[in-house]
Image (cartoon, helix red, strand yellow):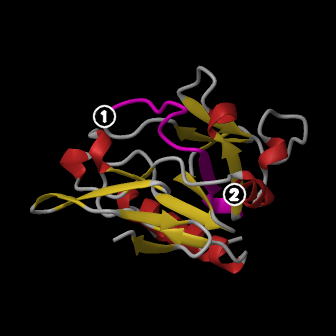
Amino acid sequence: MNNPGLNIKDQKRRGEWAEMRFLARVSELGMTVTRPWGDSLHYDMVVESEGGWLRVQVKSSTCKRNNSYFINLHGSSHYYTKDDFDFIAAYIIPINLWYIIPAEAALRGRDKLCMTPDSPKTRYAPYQEAWHLLLQKCRRQDSISKLTICHPEAAESPASRVTPNEGSMHSAGGTATANKSIDPSSRKMRSSG
């Protein structure tokens, strides 16, 4: 199979192309996808379905050794931890195959993923095209635990978090504390007065 992504030589552009493929696939499955602004977070997409939210890191590979494909588990500044995202979506470009892997399974003391698509007994075989895991995990979440809506410099400030019961937001001009919350059932901001 000749996948058009193989013709993209620049690694950054190929990664952006893989993110667009992920966005299209998740949308086809009826989930909503949000892309955070900028590159400072350790996840690429936020997937929402039926009121649940998941952080997803999208990676892609054309790197094949023997029968396996490899993906590095680090960003530009550090190796990932399970607190950085909820799932990794690993796209094997030459064979047009996705692995949807929970962070806990992907990051167990490893610095790279080794996926062998033709071997059903490998560690990541159960995660081939496992889009249902995103749907199931989203449906099990009762509320939004930590959806960050903030200016990048304020990301670590407790006041920058918006949860269903409290709300203050940071804007580019500074902190704007408001009585706002997110109603997960309606997906709308509401003001409490």
The quarter of the rendered structure image containing the N terminus is bottom right
> Would residue 85 be counted in the magenta stretch?
yes
Front in this rendered view, residue 180 or 192? 192
Q: Amino acid at mark 2?
A: Cys
SS at badge 2: helix
Label 1 Cα neighbours within 10 Å, binned few <14 / some 14-19 / many ≥20: few
Give percent across and percent down for residue 186.
Answer: 58, 76
Residue drawn at 63 percent across, 77 percent down: 27
Q: Which residue extends farthest top? A: 109
| Residue 131 visible somewhere in the drawing | yes
Residue drawn at 27 percent across, 58 percent down: 169
> Would residue 165 be counted in the magenta stretch?
no
Span shown in magenta: 77-95
Residue that label 1 marks: 77
Give percent across and percent down for residue 146.
Answer: 47, 47
SS at badge 1: loop
Front in this rendered view, residue 9 or 150? 150
Q: Amino acid at mark 1?
A: Ser
> Left or right: 191 with respect to 25?
left
| Residue 61 visible somewhere in the drawing | no
Q: Which residue extends farthest front? A: 193
CB contact under 8 Å: marks 2 and 1? no
The quarter of the rendered structure image containing the C terminus is bottom left
User: On residue 138, which mark appears?
Assistant: 2
State the image quarter where residue 151 is shown.
bottom left
Residue drawn at 53 percent across, 27 percent down: 111
Label 2 Cα neighbours within 10 Å, binned few <14 / some 14-19 / many ≥20: many
Residue drawn at 52 percent across, 64 percent down: 18
